[in-house]
């Protein structure tokens, strides 16, 4: 990419020199190259392995913006990452200088550094928020999220819509087409430096673990020899193919822990793609007498755990299984998954980061950017369920998981283990380990909210030009349907339904432009039809939950709400959704998700002051899922309070927000529950 003038950051007393002096570590060449681009006010894409230190480039960009009197936004794909980065930057720059904006929390939005989920920035851009004034740099952490099929469009919208003069620092996992993505970035953001680092800072050794039926102990084979599949392992596959009597079995979890402990390979993260299995593994370790901590470590763990849950009441803690959970932590073992309430997850993360926990059984959510490096990563099953079937891990998924192995500055090598399974032949694992990283592929698609905001802010020709400048169109194969054609079909539906009048918004269209939600058009139709009017706050929250809740898997019929008014309004939401989906089917668009009233009874009870124990019995979801879903309801209800036409509905929605944010739902907000009455796109 284009190189500009010599970097001014090399001055002895400049921001670059001060930043590097404060690190206490020697920077790698790729970090220097990326920081040089920041010093030239260029945008930069850093594609590097997990744990390589690419976030230091983002941290320097933030420091440089502050040094120049400007503002910096640090965006992340998930709230857990936002919370973690908020805590880091607050410790570095002081709490008054750092804000936090997520769907349900608005804390110090006018601070010079604001951490936010990517959707919040997109919403600001559409609203032309005054918070954008003075913005110098935007960090897009985990920018490879733009290939997420549901949320990926947001990253492209941000890159295309952010005003000129704002530079971007985009951090990506290792991808094969970084240069192509960088060329696109340059086409929309101006001079952009692409920095690719393939070298891991800590060497990774790959292993394959197998056991024999009737015998104790684990046999460990190197997965690779000379960068190619180990012939000894391939012979293992051959023996099993030739003989149905081969007595192989998967190593037991306690056997794996004993092996790793004896080999000096702890602490370890074992990835299991099942929340229940993570909990079972933790219980099994306790029952088998696994104890991996010293007296001093147990005392420190107890202090951290008690601090993390100090805002939860005793009854809530009993409901959440605090006793067995904290006993496991004190033994050095813990689960980590989205089914745990945030306070529990954060305690695990803090204990692990201090080296107090020795084994964590985790789902893949831990691999998505949470800063929890280990000496060893164990992949228990080399396959994952993908909604309708199960298939082997891809090279990108394997790299993402094993990227946690090897702690920079602590370990000379990291270790990755895959456990034997009948459906996991050695050769498959070895080939995946040496396969190149995947391409970054756009998932961009126009939404109804994007459509009305394009109409509100740009001419038809300008709107088409914006879509044509997306990475999705950049990558589109010749002859495929253009994104403009998809937009035009959405515009046709909006025109038929009265949200548009030609290339202009009606009053209903103006409301839709301020609704940032996966089911944006359905939410607007629910408001227009008065489905939420006349409802008391708890009932409004319960009905609104059907627009955001999605059961993790199909099962028994969910509990029906006790209130006839709620049941009646849920039926009205379902009817409106059927009409929207019918229109989408007719014109060949991806259909809006069906509403799901499965959490409505629990949300009504929670907003009405019910105990956590009683509400969870109604919810039929894990505690962590309940908290996450209620926060999504809060986000939606806050928007309803802003855009609803009926004053009573606005008032009811405002009160519902306050009623929902209590107890375990608000206990872990890092900004001390700092929340403003504004919605997700403050002006």
Image: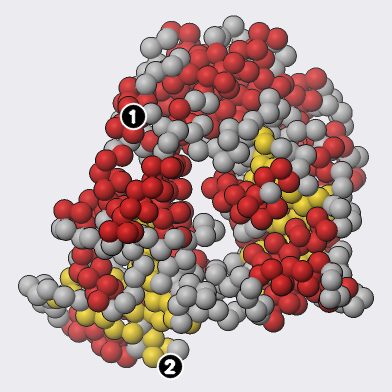
- Which of label 1 and label 2 is nearer to you? 1
* Residue nearer the viewer, 322 or 435: 322
Which label sits on residue 201?
none
> Which quadrant holds residue 319?
top left
Left or right of 564 on screen, residue 150: right
Which label belongs to residue 226?
Answer: 2
- Residue 674 shows in the view: yes
- In the displayed structure image, the side of residue 508 where residue 163 appears, left or right: right
Query: Is 345 placed above or below 28 here?
Result: above
Percent coordinates x, y for residue 39 in the rendering:
84, 69
Residue 478 percent across, percent down from the top left = 73, 63
Instruction: Count residues near mark 1 (Cα–Cα under 10 Å), then give few for <14, some for 14-19, many for 20+.
Output: few
Image mark for residue 314: 1
Q: Is residue 158 visible?
A: no
Q: Residue at x 67, y 45 (%)?
A: 95
Mark 1 in CB contact with mark 2 (< 8 angstroms):
no
**Camera-nearest residue between 204 and 261:** 261
Most foreground residue, 272 or 657: 657
Image coords of residue 417 (percent x, y): 34, 73
Measuring 80% from the left and 33% from the top, which residue is drawn there?
A: 683
């Amino acid at each position: 990419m284009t190189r500009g003038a010599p970097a001014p950051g090399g001055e002895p007393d400049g921001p670059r020199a001060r930043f590097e002096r404060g690190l206490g570590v020697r920077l790698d060449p790729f970090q220097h190259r990326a920081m040089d681009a920041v010093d030239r006010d260029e945008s930069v894409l850093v594609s590097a392995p997990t744990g390589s230190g690419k976030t230091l480039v983002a941290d320097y960009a933030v420091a440089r913006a502050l040094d120049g009197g400007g503002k910096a936004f640090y965006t992340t794909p998930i709230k857990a990452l936002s919370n973690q980065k908020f805590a880091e930057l607050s410790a570095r720059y002081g709490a008054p200088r750092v804000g936090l904006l997520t769907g349900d929390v608005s804390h110090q939005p006018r601070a010079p550094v604001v951490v936010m989920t990517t959707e919040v920035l997109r919403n600001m851009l559409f609203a032309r928020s005054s918070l954008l004034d003075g913005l110098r740099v935007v960090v897009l952490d985990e920018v490879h999220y733009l290939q997420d099929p549901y949320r990926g469009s947001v990253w492209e919208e941000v890159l295309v819509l952010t005003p000129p003069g704002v530079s971007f620092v985009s951090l990506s996992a290792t991808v094969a087409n970084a240069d192509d993505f960088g060329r696109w970035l340059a086409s929309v953001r101006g001079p952009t430096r692409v920095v690719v680092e393939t070298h891991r800072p800590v060497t990774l050794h790959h292993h394959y673990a197998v056991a024999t039926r009737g015998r104790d102990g684990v046999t460990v084979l190197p997965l690779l020899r000379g960068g190619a599949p180990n012939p000894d392992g391939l012979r293992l596959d051959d023996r099993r193919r030739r003989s149905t009597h081969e007595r192989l079995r998967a190593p037991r979890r306690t056997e794996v822990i004993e092996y790793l402990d004896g080999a000096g390979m702890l602490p370890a993260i074992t990835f299991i793609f099942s929340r229940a299995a993570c909990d079972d593994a933790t219980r099994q370790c306790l029952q088998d007498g696994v104890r991996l901590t010293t007296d001093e470590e147990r005392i420190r763990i107890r202090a951290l755990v008690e601090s993390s849950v100090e805002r939860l009441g005793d009854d809530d803690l009993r409901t959440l299984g605090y006793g067995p959970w904290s006993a496991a932590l004190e033994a050095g073992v813990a689960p980590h998954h989205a089914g745990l309430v945030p306070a529990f997850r954060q305690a695990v993360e803090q204990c692990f980061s201090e080296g107090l926990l020795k084994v964590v059984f985790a789902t893949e959510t831990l691999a998505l950017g949470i800063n929890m490096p280990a000496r060893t990563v164990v992949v228990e099953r080399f396959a994952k369920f993908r909604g309708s079937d199960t298939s082997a891990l891809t090279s990108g998924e394997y790299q993402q998981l094993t990227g946690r192995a090897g702690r920079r500055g602590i370990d000379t090598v990291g270790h990755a283990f895959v456990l034997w399974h009948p459906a996991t032949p050695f050769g498959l694992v070895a080939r995946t380990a040496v396969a190149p990283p995947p391409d970054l592929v756009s998932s961009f698609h126009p939404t109804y909210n994007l459509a009305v905001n394009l109409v509100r802010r740009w001419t038809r020709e300008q709107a088409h030009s914006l879509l044509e400048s997306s990475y999705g169109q950049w990558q589109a194969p010749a002859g495929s349907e253009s994104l403009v054609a998809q937009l035009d079909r959405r515009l046709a539906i909006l025109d038929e339904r009265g949200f548009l009048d030609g290339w202009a918004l009606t009053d209903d269209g103006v409301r839709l432009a301020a609704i940032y939600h996966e089911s944006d058009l359905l939410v607007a139709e629910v408001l227009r039809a008065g489905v939420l009017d006349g409802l008391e706050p708890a009932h409004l929250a319960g009905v609104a939950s059907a627009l955001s809740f999605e059961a993790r898997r199909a099962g028994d019929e969910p509990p029906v709400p006790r209130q006839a008014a709620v049941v009646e309004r849920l039926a009205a939401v379902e009817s409106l959704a059927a009409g929207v989906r019918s229109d989408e089917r007719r014109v060949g668009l991806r259909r809006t998700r069906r509403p799901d009233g499965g959490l409505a009874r629990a949300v009504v009870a929670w907003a009405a002051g019910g105990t956590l124990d009683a509400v969870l019995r109604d919810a039929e979801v894990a505690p962590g899922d309940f908290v996450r879903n209620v926060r999504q309801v809060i986000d939606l209800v806050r928007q309803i309070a802003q855009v609803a036409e009926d004053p009573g509905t606005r008032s009811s929605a405002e009160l519902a927000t306050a009623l929902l944010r209590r107890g375990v739902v608000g206990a872990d907000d890092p900004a001390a529950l700092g929340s403003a009455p504004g919605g997700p796109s403050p002006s």
